[in-house]
Amino acid sequence: MNATRERPEIRFLTSGDVTAHERAAAERAVRQALGSAQGVSSIQVTLSVVADPSLPRPALAQAVVDLDGRRVRAQAAAPRIVEAIDLLRERLAVRASSLQPR
């Protein structure tokens, strides 16, 4: 019998010019990164955009996940928030998979 695995709700913190579309993209990216991970009990995502054109990477995406009692953190900075979200997805997937039993 297959049990349905439920993921906890993602808590979001945002600052700067972050749209609902970008927030939804971050949610999809984090859920994809944690796709097969077991033991996820909490997820917090921070999206931040600094309105300073002199900064080379003003967009930041960060995730902190409780995975089997261990805190897993991944973050990425990029020129645009969508790029930061893509990098975050890749980094979080690597970190989460390295902590899962083989």
Image (spheres, rainbow, N blue to C red):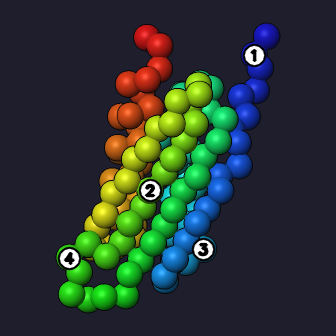
Closer to viewer: mark 4 or mark 1: 4
User: Where does label 4 land, which residue?
Assistant: 56
Task: Look at the picture and state if 52 lies above or below 64.
Answer: below
Instruction: Looking at the image, tell me whether mark 4 or mark 3 is earlier in sequence order.
Output: 3
- Residue, x 79% and y 10% (percent of image)? 1
Q: How many marks?
A: 4
Q: Which mark is residue 20?
A: 3
Q: Label 4, label 1: how many angstroms apart (C-alpha)?
A: 47 Å
Q: Quadrant of residue 58?
A: bottom left
Residue at disc 1, secondary structure: loop
- Residue, x 26% and y 72% (percent of image)? 57
Q: Label 4, label 3: how many angstroms apart (C-alpha)?
A: 24 Å
Q: Amino acid at mark 3?
A: Ala
User: Where does label 2 land, which residue?
Assistant: 62
Percent coordinates x, y for residue 85 in the rendering: 41, 59
Q: Would residue 91 appear left or right of 56 to someone viewing this image?
A: right
Closer to viewer: mark 3 or mark 1: 3
User: Where does label 1 land, which residue?
Assistant: 2
Q: Nearer the viewer, residue 55 or 78?
A: 55
